[in-house]
Image (cartoon, rainbow, N blue to C red):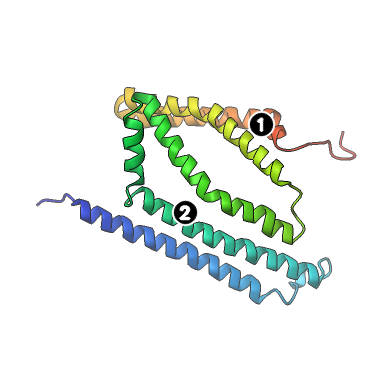
Amino acid sequence: MNTSFSPGAFTALFLAAFFASLALRLWLGMRHARFVQAHAGAVPAFFAQRISLESHRKAAAYTVAKTRLGLLATLAEAALLLGLTLGGGLAQLHDFWNARLAGLAYGVALIFSVMAVSALVDLPFSLVRQFVIEARFGFNRMSLGLFFADLAKQTALGLAIGTPVLLAILWLMADLGSLWWLYAWIFWCLFSLVLQLIFPTWIAPLFNRFSPLQGAR
């Protein structure tokens, strides 16, 4: 019996899983927004003595606005995934870099290209989230210049940290045989531990200001 799947069968299976996942995410998001909206008119009894009705309504409106934007972002992410896979986007990126680079450099360039495209798709939603929704509800304390300055620092930091990590993972995949995944997992665990140690001291202060708690010893 021939149990192999044709490319068409794999495509159909991928699309079925893709649209089922997308429909579930959209349904859950819309259900969450409707639930919050339906209960915006009354403060829950547990919080009634500490939260005013006005604050409760503001929190509900803020949640609904962020959820709706998240639904639009989900649709954009879905369109990007289809564009990269069935739309041939990955193949075009492969052709572009394969003609210019080889080996590990090709792999790093391809992965960073996909990440860059994803970041560009997400950028309008980040701007709306920060300068429309957060500003509308009085939570925005960031200027447009600071937003792009932070974005530049995040990009530079991602390249500085991500490039050697990607090179290491791709080398493990290429040179360590069938157990590459085990060595890659060990490497990733060690890297995550080191990152947890250096993040509060070296990385977080690049984006935030910290001061001791009042009264803390």
SS for callout 2: helix
SS for callout 1: helix
Judge whether 81 appears above or below 101 on screen.
below
**Residue visible at 35% across and 58% down in the picture:** 17
Please tell me how crowded label 2 is: few (under 14), some (14-19), or many (20+) other residues with Cα within 10 Å: some
Res. 176 in view: no
Which of these two is toward me, 182 or 138?
138
Please tell me how crowded label 1 is: few (under 14), some (14-19), or many (20+) other residues with Cα within 10 Å: few
**Residue visible at 36% across and 32% down in the picture:** 97
Farthest residue to the left: give it.
Answer: 1
**Residue visible at 65% across and 32% down in the picture:** 199
| Residue 94 locus on image (x, y percent) | 33, 37
* Residue ID for mark 2: 77
Identify the mark at residue 182; answer none if there is no mark: none
Return the disc, 1 or 2, that comes first in the chain's sequence. Answer: 2
Which amino acid does the dot numbered 2 rest on?
A: Glu
**How many numbered marks are there?**
2
Which amino acid does the dot numbered 1 rest on?
A: Ile
**Residue visible at 35% across and 43% down in the picture:** 90
How far apart are labels 1 and 2 at the CA level? 28 Å
Which of these two is toward me, 143 or 156?
143
| Residue 117 locus on image (x, y percent) | 47, 44
Judge whether 80 appears above or below 155 on screen.
below
Res. 186 in view: yes
91 sits left or right of 65 in the view = left
* Residue ID for mark 1: 203
Q: Quadrant of the C terminus?
A: top right
200 sits left or right of 92 in the view = right
50 sits left or right of 64 in the view = right
| Residue 209 locus on image (x, y percent) | 77, 37
Which quadrant of the figure has residue 201?
top right
